Amino acid sequence: RRVGVTSQAKKVLLEGGTDQPNIQLTNNGYDFSAGTLQSKSFLPEGIFMCAIGFGSVPLFSTADLPPSILSASAGWLSFERPIADDHVELIHPDKLDLDQRIEVVDARTGCHVGHYFGSDGFCINASALNFVPLEKISGDHSKECMDVIGPFSWRSFPEDVAVKNDSKQPAIIPSHEMLRKVILSKVEKEEIILGAGCFWHVEFALRRIPGVIDTVAGYAGGTLPYPTYKDICSGTTGHAEVVKVVFDPTVCDTGKLIDCWLAMHDPTVVRAHGKRARETGQYRSCAFVSNEKMKKIASDTMKTCQQQLGKELSSEVKLLTTNGFWAAEERHQRHDERRRSVELYTLSFEQWLLKYGRRSAPVTGSSESIRAEHFDDLDDGMARMMI
């Protein structure tokens, strides 16, 4: 059931107002005031979203409420962290402003929700939020709740463990684990396998596309079962370096993902690691799809791209056969994230195109393969995304 927005919520969200202290009542009627909670075990598990806007993204979780929530001195809701850094925006004051607090706004709507106080965390107005209990998301009303929550960044929900500095310790914080478990049980997922050069760099770029849930670097299109990287480099197996992409089609449909793939490399050039024949070489442009519907979408998108470029594409699109994809060795998985020791942030489609939508050595493949083929003088630029 859609919930209306109270006058107090509007005052906070649209005018930058503040709730009265010690009144921690959400817009949809959940009371988190200290007087109503006997212990933290009485806290219902769930997530908080902005009270304005259909398809709001999750902002905070009860898993990140500090122990002080039970203190009578806790005048407002406070959180140790947001569910995802890119779901909120911090607005720093001008040096001449009398109010030097850092404002917290919902990144999707731009509405004011509270303030950030550094190590003391996020002080948030409860009236600016709607609370959705975990049991409601997981129960009979899950589809309704998921429709209200809408699509959001998958960056904060890694499927395995931390990759920074080759750490093998679990990296998922409690709020992420709670939400990820629910979302993954409800979300629609599709898979596609894409090759556009060295899989290290291709995987790094693809993981920043909105709606991409998970990626696996690997090999496809060859004849040898259980191939190794050494086998691939021999040039005798017929495999290409590829990335299996698991994505949420409600956020990034197949057409957009194919557009991104075509934009991140030059699909008119046979980049085959020294070989110029089509459908050969480990760095070739290729897509392996799971069904005829996806194959038609890919083919139609490629036709449009070919018309825009005025050149024939070298890319191949095929149905993936049984045992057609083999995961690469662990050292190749999310390679660039480990080497660069960076935290990936999901980009908007426009931001992604500006960063990766041009041909450059780190994305299309190794510099050795590019120099070996000497095709630069025949290239008139990158494919453009058609979104």
Image: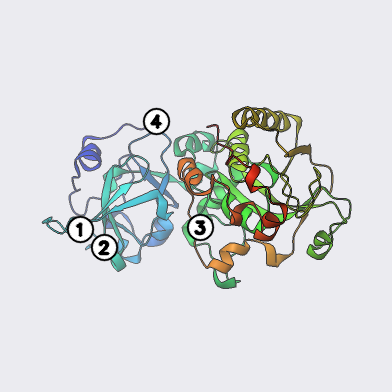
Which of discs 1 and 3 lies nearer the camera? The answer is 3
Which residue occupies the foreground of this view, 132 or 288? 288
The kind of residue on which mark 3 rests is Leu
Which of discs 4 and 2 lies nearer the camera? The answer is 2
> For mark 2, does the 10 Å Cα neighbourhood hold few (<14), some (14 to 19), or many (20 or more) residues?
few
Badge 2 marks a residue whose secondary structure is loop
- Label whose residue precedes the other's in the sequence (3 or 4): 4
Q: Position of residue 335 (x, y in %)?
A: 63, 64
Residue 21 in the figure: left or right of residue 351: left
Q: Up-down: is 319 above or below 176?
A: above
> Is residue 167 among the parts visible in the rendering?
no
Which residue occupies the foreground of this view, 55 or 155? 155
Residue 101, which numbered label? 1
The kind of residue on which mark 2 rests is Phe
The kind of residue on which mark 1 rests is Arg
**Pointers 2 and 3 in contact (C-beta within 8 Å):** no
